[in-house]
Amino acid sequence: TACPSGVQYGALLEPARELVEHHRHVSPAERVLRWVGLHQLMPYRQRLKLLASALWLYQKSGLQALVRRMNILPAHLRAMEAIMPPLTPRYVDYSTPAPAAGERRGRVAFVIGCIQEAFLAPVNQATRRVLRRNGFEIVTPMAQTCCGAAHAHVGELDAARALARRNIDAFLAEDVTAIIVNAGGCGLALKEYPHLLKDDPIYAERAQRFAALVRDVNEFLAENLHHPPRGEVRVRATYVDSCHLRHGQRVSRQPRELLRAVPGLELVELRQPDRCCGSAGVYNIAQPDIADQVLDAKMKDVASTGATLVVTTNTGCHLQLVAGVRKAGLNARVAHVVEVLDESYRAER
């Protein structure tokens, strides 16, 4: 968004990443970690949920505190462990359509996500409740898979294309007016399927139809908030933009509008709201030292607001900010915009 000529840097970087990956030396440890994460876990929600349940035991047993105190993990694993949120592995059944609450105003499809569902399931559940409260029936295609963003970030474009085709088939089989996604990075990846599949003779046109339906939950609710929140949420909050949402999808006004609609909530802007938190897809795992420096700068900005609620709209940012709040010793919690709306609706009831 900083380029006055509108150069699409993301589109230029993708083939460069792919070229670099084909020529650089990858250590055996990184190769195994990437194979497990990108190919054996992220495309499979059930495996991720099992992992999350195991990590919940790791947290509850006190082993996490011991491992962190001893600092014994290798750098990349230490970076992954650091962004683990407090886990609540309680999941709901998405296979049955969820009816609208009150007057039915439309039918939408919901993107569950992979890391989002396994590690931030309460965000997904709040998203469904808020959409239903505003009159939308929700269908969740169970054949959907990972959006492929992480694969594209590290230059594995063939794998990203395979996942994109699966998602297109799953969602276009449904009769809906919109495909709702609550993660800024995933939403951008889904909206960019036409670019990813532009040379595919079968899926190029289908990708265009799919992307035309994809809406970030913030932009969708800003236009379809049929039941404005009325319950008070008395808190001082600051909003941390997802770079993928702000710069990639051009969605920055709508989350703020939704937060300002919540009675009792005081929204305080950061001094540098357009600066990255250091997550950047999988950058905080691939380059943890530099990502930590970026995160430290972001948390100083957050601390200056005096906020006790840090609000975001992307999976990677959410996990990164949880780690940042803990590292900076702030008396604050991290939540998604839809969780704040859901809290207001519950307070109203």
Image: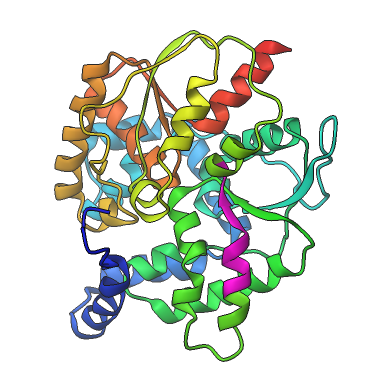
Report the residue at 69% width, 65% height from top. Answer: 171
Q: Is residue 336 magenta?
A: no
Report the residue at 29% width, 67% height from top. Answer: 8
Q: Picture coordinates of residue 68 (x, y %)?
A: 28, 35
Say if residue 224 shows up in the picture: yes
In the rendered structure, the answer to whether residue 30 lies left or right of residue 309 reads left
- In the image, 28 versus 289, the foreground residue is 289
Q: Quadrant of residue 325?
A: top left
Q: Picture coordinates of residue 116 (x, y %)?
A: 52, 47
Say if residue 61 shows up in the picture: no
In the rendered structure, the answer to whether residue 196 lies left or right of residue 14 reads right
Residue furthest to the bottom: 201
Q: Is residue 192 above or below residue 95?
A: below
Quadrant containing the C terminus is top right
Q: Is residue 78 above or below residue 37?
A: above
Stretch of the chain drawn in magenta: 208-217
Q: Picture coordinates of residue 264 (x, y %)?
A: 51, 9
